[in-house]
Amino acid sequence: MAKKPQSNKNSILLELLFYAALPYIIWNFGREPLGDYVAMLLSTVPGIVYTLYRFIVDRQFNITGLFILSSMLIGTTVDLLSGSAEQMIINGIYLGLFYTFIYFILFVVKRPFTLYIAVDFAYLQGYDRKDSRTLFFQKGIFQWFQIIQTVFIIRGLFMAGLTAFLLNKYGIDGYGDMLIYKKVAGWIFSIIVMGLFFNINNVIQKHTKQSEENKQPETESSEVVTESV
């Protein structure tokens, strides 16, 4: 039990290293010899490598894994086709809004992406996917996944707006600071999402316990009928 906080701490430090510190260093020291565009492309490499590493270690497959790999492929392709550092940032804003639009559509059709993330996670814990989906779509649980989906939408709009604001205010020279601001904002939203998922876990446990208690009297009643016969 005592190892979990250390593991979480290490994960935070690794994210800070690969998503913020290394990109910032590559950007600052690579701009002059390589140019803005190449330096910015190279600054995305540590994050891609770490994401692939976490993908393999955490064994994230199916919908969650497919989304991670496809988003990395799309993001890298867009970066390579951008042609300039500034256009790369602008395209990143548009790409973020595109994902946000998908989240919104999934919210409207009541198929929240967050629910399928939970299904994948439950599967890694040994639970059947079909049973998890049936449970998560039940009244009293499903609404919380819609709430988290809403946070995803808000996060997408906020991050796009923050990036556009920083680019307009500081220009391409502020890219290093932009990485830090966006990472901090991302952590804030991650804390909110983690808190909501923790709440969903409590709701699911209470729902499961209540369902088991409701089934118990029916079982006892069946036993009484059998004995009387």
Image: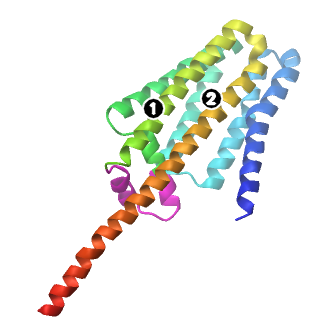
Relative to 135, does residue 226 appear above or below in the rendering? below
Identify which residue is drawn at 75% across, 26% down. 180
Identify the element where label 2 is drawn. Answer: helix
Q: Determine the image quadrant of residue 220.
A: bottom left
Horizontally, is 127 left or right of 186 in the view? left
Identify which residue is drawn at 36% across, 56% down. 135
Identify the element where label 1 is drawn. Answer: helix
Residue 186 rendering spot, x and y as whole percentages: 64, 31
**Going by the picture, which residue comes out furthest to the left?**
229
Type of amino acid under label 2: Thr
Relative to 61, does residue 172 appear above or below in the rendering? above
Among numbered discs 2 and 1, the one appearing first in the sequence: 2
* Image quarter in which the N terminus is found: bottom right
Type of amino acid under label 1: Thr
Front position in the image: 114 or 202:
202
Q: Is residue 1 visible?
A: yes
Relative to 30, does residue 54 appear above or below in the rendering? below
**How many C-alpha atoms fall within 10 Å of the one at disc 2: few (<14), some, or many (≥20)?**
some
Q: Determine the image quadrant of residue 226.
A: bottom left
Q: Is residue 84 visible?
A: no
Horizontally, is 200 left or right of 25 in the view? left
Residue 36 rendering spot, x and y as whole percentages: 78, 15
Please state the extent of the stretch shown in magenta in the rendering.
119-138
Q: Determine the image quadrant of residue 105.
A: top left
Q: Main structural element of the magenta stretch: helix, strand or loop? A: helix
Identify which residue is drawn at 34% across, 49% down. 137
Magenta stretch: residue 25 in it? no
Numbered mark located on residue 150 in the image = 1
Numbered mark located on residue 76 in the image = 2
Identify which residue is drawn at 74% across, 11% down. 172
Relative to 189, does residue 170 appear above or below in the rendering? above
